[in-house]
Amino acid sequence: MKPEALVTGASSGIGAATCRLLRSEGWTVYGLARGESPEATVSLRGDVARYDDVRAAFERAPGVRLVVHSAATVGPLTLLQDSEPNEWRHAVDVNLLGTYHVLRAALAGDVELFVHLTTGAASRAKPHWSAYSASKAGAEHLVRSAAADVDGSGRGVCALDPGMTETRMQEQIRASDFPGVERFVRAHDERTSRSPEEVAEAVLELSRRDPASLNGLTLQVGSL
């Protein structure tokens, strides 16, 4: 029987690349996203900010042993004092509550390894990035809390930082106006940022390790 995985944010970027690679390695992959996930074996439509959507996805995929949580949003990229409260709240709904929803559903089942895609912004404060940084910092700490809850069970909950990666989110960042945007533009122009496929390879490597050995860790792509 093929091993089964569920990937969030599966319609594009890292999520789509992860679906494609896992399928090539013999996995049955359920892709959860608001749009279609053509690289997944089974495409599931849903929003991680809605628990009912997440629960329904896991009900469709009861044999999943690996979860890769890559769904996220970067906006609003603006000064805190200029931010629109509903947009700021949306970042929390997707990045923090979405992580809770996926963890809640995954750990209630038989998932062995949960890989959360994190970011350096979760530990570094930068102007204009309050929504993304705060919500991803909360999500990363939530992952550590979940790891503490499953410690000793043989399961693993970990975070993986991909670094700067060429995705739609990076396109959105480069099109924004904030201090330091030149660094993102330069990385794109000089082709020093990672491809989604490189991140997917790191996920595949983690899937081959003992889940318990990864529990509670925050890992870096390129340093596995």
Image: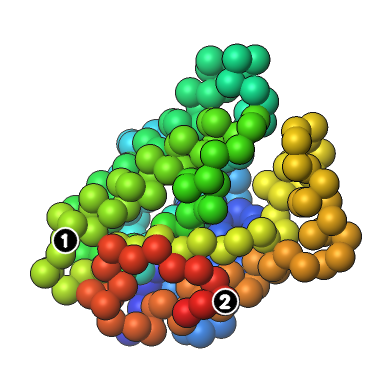
Q: Position of residue 70 (x, y in %)?
A: 50, 54
**Left or right for 185, reference 60:** right
Q: Position of residue 64 (x, y in %)?
A: 32, 66
Q: Residue at x 65, y 15 (%)?
A: 82
Total numbered badges shown on the rendered structure: 2
Answer few, some or many: residues within 10 Å of disc 1's Cα (few below 14, many 20 plus, some between 14 and 19): some
Residue 94 visible (yes or no): no
Q: Residue at x 56, y 82 (%)?
A: 24
Q: State the separation of the CA atoms marked 2 and 1.
A: 27 Å
Q: Residue at x 63, y 74 (%)?
A: 198
- Residue type (three-letter) at the residue carrying disc 1: Val
Q: Position of residue 73 (x, y in %)?
A: 57, 40
Residue 201 visible (yes or no): yes
Quarter of the picture holding the N terminus: bottom left
Residue 177 has which mark?
none
Q: How is the image coloured?
A: rainbow
Determine the image quadrant of residue 125: top right
In the depicted structure, whether residue 15 falls above or below residue 20: above
- Residue type (three-letter) at the residue carrying disc 2: Gly
Which of the two discs, 2 and 1, labels the residue nearer the N terminus? 1
Tell me the residue that label 1 is attached to. Answer: 150
In the depicted structure, whether residue 176 falls above or below residue 186: above
- Contact, mark 2 vs mark 1 (Cβ under 8 Å): no
Q: Farthest residue in the right direction?
A: 189
**Dot 1: what SS?**
helix
In the depicted structure, whether residue 17 falls above or below residue 145: below
Tell me the residue that label 2 is attached to. Answer: 222
In the depicted structure, whether residue 5 falls above or below residue 92: below
Q: Residue at x 54, y 71 (%)?
A: 221
